[in-house]
Amino acid sequence: DVKVTQSSRYLVKRTGEKVFLECVQDMDHENMFWYRQDPGLGLRLIYFSYDVKMKEKGDIPEGYSVSREKKERFSLILESASTNQTSMYICASSHNRLAVVHEQFFGPGTRLTVL
Amino acid sequence: AQSVTQPDIHITVSEGASLELRCNYSYGATPYLFWYVQSPGQGLQLLLKYFSGDTLVQGIKGFEAEFKRSQSSFNLRKPSVHWSDAAEYFCAVGAQGGSYIPTFGRGTSLIVHP
């Protein structure tokens, strides 16, 4: 069974803390994504990676950074957490073969609360 | 750049009733189209996708969707809704020959009454 796993389902952090969210996929996918989901706003793309060490900013990259040192792992970093970063964070992966937008596989999400 | 509109934020249906969730897109050529479902406490799961060919696409859990180029729509349908279909539904569109990043609609929340 193919899987995208995220390091935590729930996380509580304090304002100013550095936060690491990890995502691992076992499908040998080239593309990996980090989204943020808030009520009424749908999925908003934070960062995208199409290869190891490669990244592109999404729609809302401010306050976030990412790291992709290995193909299967994509980390989201909140350099200094703020209360407005309280949200559900969702990781996804997909192939990038043949210049086709393939279906994405999603992790279960991490609900982050920043106090 | 492509865009997606899901006009209905919430839809309420009775169990056993038929369902149609609307999705309209904006894109100059034939897009890649997807419907995903997010059940409570679960990750998003692909229901169905359209790349080319037959415009009526069958998916999992008894869902289907029809691509209508003239209306720029890809509406999701199910003839008889079950209580377990209560979930958030997302339509997504991808561009041919372009970025690998699909664009998502804001989602439609389906409420099922017994």
Image: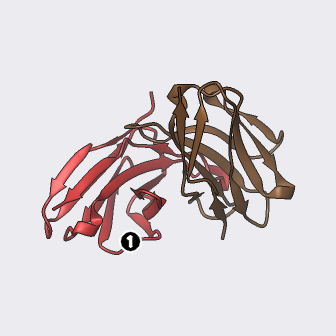
Which percent across, then down, holds residue B40?
41, 37
Q: Quadrant of residue B30?
A: bottom right
The N terminus of chain A - image quarter: top left
What residue sits 58% from the left and 59% below the top? B100
Q: Residue at x 37, y 37 (%)?
A: B41
Q: Is residue B103 left or right of residue B70?
A: left
Residue B89: x %, y % from top left: 56, 44
Q: Quadrant of residue A35?
A: bottom left
- Which color has been applied to chain B in this rendered view? brown
Identify the secondary structure beneath mark 1: loop
Chain A colour?
A: red
Residue density around tag 1, few if under 14, some if 14–19, many if 20 or more, within 10 Å: some
Residue identified by numbered label 1:
A61
Residue B11 coordinates in the image, percent (x, y): 59, 45
Observer-nearest of A32 and B23: B23
Where A114 falls versus B61 (above or below)?
Answer: below
Q: Residue drawn 15% across and 58% down?
A: A13
Residue type at the position of mark 1: Pro
Vertical side of B67 occupied by B63: above or below: above
